[in-house]
Amino acid sequence: MGRGDKKTAKGKRFKGSFGVSRSKDAIKAKLKRTASKKPVAAATAEAPVKAKKAAKKKAE
């Protein structure tokens, strides 16, 4: 069971085929879910740091 086995997802990736183990619909749905999620925590964490740096520059 490995790259040469077309019954596994790894084998299908190697061969470049799709099927039960690696269906296009499941892959597209997963990509759509991850793309729709926005990294909210990262954006809000950086905002206070930038404000502090700007305040320091103004003070100098």
Image: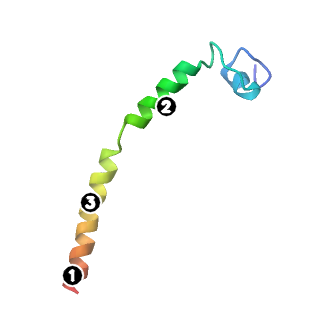
Q: Contact (CB < 8 A) between labels 1 and 2?
A: no
Where, quadrant-wise, is the C terminus in this rendering?
Answer: bottom left
Colour mode? Answer: rainbow
C-alpha span from label 2 to label 3: 28 Å
Determine which quarter of the picture holds residue 36.
top left
Q: Which residue is mark 3?
A: 47
Q: Position of residue 15 (x, y in %)?
A: 76, 25
| Residue located 62% across and 19% down the image | 22
- Classify residue 57 by image quadrant: bottom left
The mark that comes first in sequence, 1 or 2, is 2
Q: Position of residue 37 (x, y in %)?
A: 37, 37
Quadrant in which the N terminus appears: top right
**Which residue is at the front of the view, 18 or 48?**
18
* Classed neighbour count for the residue bearing mark 3: other residues with Cα under 10 Å, few (<14), some (14–19), many (≥20): few
What kind of residue is marked 1?
A: Lys
Q: Which mark is residue 58?
A: 1
Using the image, determine if residue 37 lies above or below residue 59: above
Q: Is 47 placed above or below 40 here?
A: below
Alpha-carbon neighbours of circle 2 within 10 Å: few (<14), some, or many (≥20)? few
Give the amino acid at mark 3. Answer: Ala
Label 1 residue SS: helix
- For label 2, the residue is 31
SS at mark 3? helix
Q: Position of residue 23 (x, y in %)?
A: 59, 18
Q: How far apart in space, not on screen, are marks 3 and 1 (Cα)?
A: 17 Å
